[in-house]
Amino acid sequence: MDSFNSREDDIGHRSGAWKVAYADFVTALMALFIVLWLMSSGREVREAVAGYFKDPKGYQKLSGSAQAGSGEALEVSKNNIDRLKQSLEEAMRRLPGFKSFAQNVQFTVTGEGLRIELMEKDKGLFFETGNSKPTENGQRLFNLLAEQISGLPNTIAIEGHTDSQGFRSQNLEAYGNWELSCDRANAARRIMLAAGLRGEQVTEIRGYADHHTLIPANPADSRNRRVSVIVKYLGQ
């Protein structure tokens, strides 16, 4: 009787061994499919997957995947500000015609937060020359920034800058670079609010005229004419 039970146990062990082998095979096959999928995917997908495995909790906070139903607020901090920069850069690359003005958009991580500079060319690029009316490129970029930033609890500041070339009239009551820099920053604010940015997110509108040039060696350089959007770290 004991001999019979022993043979029955051996048969049972042998009959279950194929299940373990099959499970290993399916796991290996799934891993192969994932690797092949990643190899054929775009850079944005690969960076997203890599970001998740490097810091799952931090990545979920930034992407919003950990937010649904939990009430947990998104947060951009000094530890993950580079991820917001990459996300905005990827979103901008998908804009129609972005290659034609890619060199005129600059991202800089500063002590205040992420600074996004929209720099003009000699002829109007983001705003019509000499006034605060946005071009189609400016409208699209400010809309995109609003869509990307509106889900964050972080506040923003918007700055207007001009180059050193003044308006023809020197009358103290005439419209000049101070007015233009303020009006362009405020125009950007209005566009972004219409595109979904929350009103309480904008805490500062700054107009500097030509007193904070981006190219100090050449104050007349068109790149000094710019609007800057600063996504601030929380608490600033």
Image (cartoon, rainbow, N blue to C red):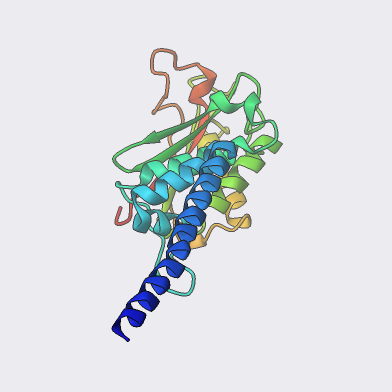
- Give the residue displayed 62% in from the left and 55% down from the top: 195
The front one of 1 and 37 is: 1
Query: Relative to 205, is 90 on the left or the right?
Result: right
| Residue 136 makes an appearance in the image | yes
- Give the residue displayed 54% in from the left and 57% down from the top: 197
Question: At which x and y percent is residue 181?
Answer: 51, 36
Query: Relative to 95, is 155 on the left or the right?
Result: left
Q: Residue furthest top?
A: 217
The front one of 230 and 24 is: 24
| Residue 229 makes an appearance in the image | no
- Give the residue displayed 59% in from the left and 37% down from the top: 40
- Give the residue displayed 64% in from the left and 31% down from the top: 98
Question: At which x and y percent is residue 129?
Answer: 65, 27
Would you place residue 182 above or below residue 164 in this image?
A: below
Question: At which x and y percent is residue 122?
Answer: 61, 18
Q: Residue furthest bottom?
A: 1
Q: Quadrant of the N terminus?
A: bottom left
Would you place residue 235 above or below residue 222 in this image?
A: below
The front one of 13 and 92 is: 13
The front one of 74 and 101 is: 74
Q: How many marks?
A: 0
Residue 8, located in which quarter of the rendered image? bottom left
Question: At which x and y percent is residue 31?
Answer: 49, 49
